[in-house]
């Protein structure tokens, strides 16, 4: 039966790496009867490799107003493209981590609409979801929006984020997966742990390929392995405070500071190893989701009585803003930014000098020619 594989994330579970891998190996996948199609639709801040974004992407028109008519038009066009592709391929793969939360916010009829379209074409829907321990996923998400070089940039603390965000649409995994199962069927959902020790062959790529019925071989190219490096502790806090400056809305300014902080983040982490939550706070946080997680392990992984996440909770100090290492990190940050500005200034001076020399050559071509002849003749 023809199958539409929909990889829905969750966010912060290697989705960008999977998408780049599929895009990079399009021809090899096609040889095996699988298609990872690319679409012509562009969305601000969304990489083209997120080929499933047309399913529920937000289109903003003139004046910053959402254009829902264009969204529906794109959806129809994209589904028509899929119909044509299914005449050639038995399996099509779409991927977009935004589906995980947008299915409960922007487009609540997402799975119903997709199932209806698939049924009309006699196509099976297969959902693939990777799960990361709730505290790790949420803190990583918060780290990302604070670190971000463009798009949504946050200046709120973790505690403020926990209070303002709707954690239900992010972290109640069992309830969300059950809602999907209620529409497309539990047998059509593949759940994976985002944990290297649980990956097939210890590889995210081998693991993902197995979910769609393929195996990783030496033929596949993995040159575009993407690692989204976060900021740690003090460097993350420095960026959070900087985000309150209006100039940070300029991508070039934002990028300059993020790159400067990346240079010292490793040293900061080494000197002050810490977590954003204490061990006790993490345990209390996870108890909220413990029962649902166990149900996922039993009902979707076939592991009754098992824990969904078996990784240990680190017993590190909780990060404190008044820690004794903040002063050193601020000095390092000032030093790195000054060095980078000095290097940029040096490059600009050289460019100005080169441009000035070029203009002089244009103004006095014969003088330049005679000067070069004299050097050549040694007179």
Image (spheres, helix red, strand yellow):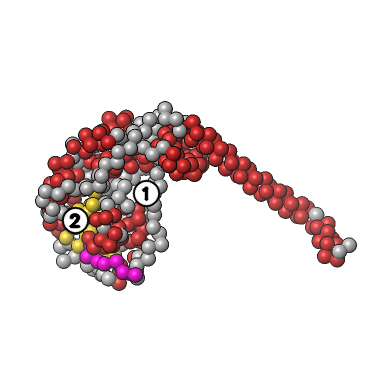
Element at label 2: strand
Question: How many residues crowd mark 2 within 10 Å: few (<14), some (14–19), many (20+)?
Answer: some
Task: Give left or right: position of 359 versus 309.
Answer: right
Splitting the image into 4 quarters, where does residue 288 fall?
A: top left
For the question of whether residue 102 can be seen, the reply is no
Up-down relation of residue 378 to residue 237 (above or below): below
User: Principal SS element in the magenta part?
Assistant: loop
Q: Residue shown at 22%/48% (left/top)?
A: 310
Element at label 1: loop
Q: Residue 32 in the image: x percent, y percent?
A: 27, 71
Q: Residue 190 in the image: x percent, y percent?
A: 19, 56
Q: Residue shown at 33%/61% (left/top)?
A: 22
Quadrant occupied by the C terminus: bottom right
Q: Residue shown at 52%/37% (left/top)?
A: 332
Splitting the image into 4 quarters, where does residue 63 fall?
A: top left
Task: Give left or right: position of 324 versus 313.
Answer: right
Check the image and name the residue furthest to the bottom: 31
Question: Which is nearer the eye, 372 or 113?
Answer: 372
Magenta-tinted stretch: 212-218
Quadrant occupied by the N terminus: bottom left
Question: Which is nearer the eye, 273 or 178?
Answer: 273
Q: Residue 252 in the image: x percent, y percent?
A: 51, 42
Check the image and name the residue furthest to the right: 379
Up-down relation of residue 91 to residue 283 (above or below): below
For the question of whether residue 237 can be seen, the reply is yes
Task: Give left or right: position of 275 versus 249.
Answer: left
Q: Residue 309 in the image: x percent, y percent?
A: 21, 47
Given this view, does label 2 or label 1 mark the residue nearer the observer?
Answer: 2
Per the image, the residue denoted by label 2 is: 190
Per the image, the residue denoted by label 1 is: 46
Q: Residue shown at 33%/45% (left/top)?
A: 59
């Amino acid at each position: 039966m023809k199958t539409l594989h929909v990889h829905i994330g969750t966010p912060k579970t290697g989705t960008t790496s999977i998408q780049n891998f599929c895009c990079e190996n399009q021809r090899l996948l096609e040889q095996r009867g699988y298609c990872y199609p690319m679409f012509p639709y562009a969305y601000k801040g969304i990489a083209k490799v997120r080929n499933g974004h047309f399913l529920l992407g937000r289109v903003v028109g003139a004046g910053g107003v959402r254009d829902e008519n264009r969204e529906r038009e794109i959806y129809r066009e994209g589904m028509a493209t899929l119909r044509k592709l299914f005449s050639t391929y038995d399996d099509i793969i779409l991927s977009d981590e935004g589906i995980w939360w947008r299915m409960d916010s922007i487009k609540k009829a997402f799975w119903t609409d997709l199932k209806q379209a698939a049924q009309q074409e006699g196509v099976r829907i297969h959902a693939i979801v990777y799960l990361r321990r709730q505290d790790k996923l949420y803190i990583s998400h918060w780290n990302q929006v604070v670190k971000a070089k463009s798009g949504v940039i946050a200046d709120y603390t973790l505690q403020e984020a926990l209070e303002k965000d709707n954690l239900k649409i992010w972290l109640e995994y069992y309830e969300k997966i059950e809602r999907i199962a209620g529409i497309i069927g539990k047998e059509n959902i593949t759940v994976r742990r985002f944990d290297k020790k649980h990956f097939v062959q210890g590889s995210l790529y081998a693991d993902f390929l197995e979910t769609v019925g393929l195996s990783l071989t030496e033929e596949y190219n993995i040159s575009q392995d993407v690692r989204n490096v976060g900021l740690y502790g003090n460097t993350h806090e420095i960026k959070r405070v900087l985000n309150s400056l209006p100039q940070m809305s300029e991508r070039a300014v934002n990028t300059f500071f993020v790159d400067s902080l990346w240079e010292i983040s490793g040293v900061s982490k080494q000197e002050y190893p810490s977590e954003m939550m204490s061990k006790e706070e993490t345990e209390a946080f996870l108890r909220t989701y413990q029962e649902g997680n166990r149900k996922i392990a039993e009902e979707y992984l076939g592991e009754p009585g098992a824990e969904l996440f078996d990784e240990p909770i680190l017993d590190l100090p909780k990060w404190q803003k008044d820690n004794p290492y903040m002063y050193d990190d601020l000095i390092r940050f000032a030093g790195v930014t000054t060095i980078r500005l000095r290097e940029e200034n040096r490059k600009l001076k050289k460019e100005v000098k080169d441009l000035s020399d070029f203009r002089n050559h244009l103004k006095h071509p014969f003088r330049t020619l005679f000067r070069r002849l004299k050097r050549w003749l040694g007179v």
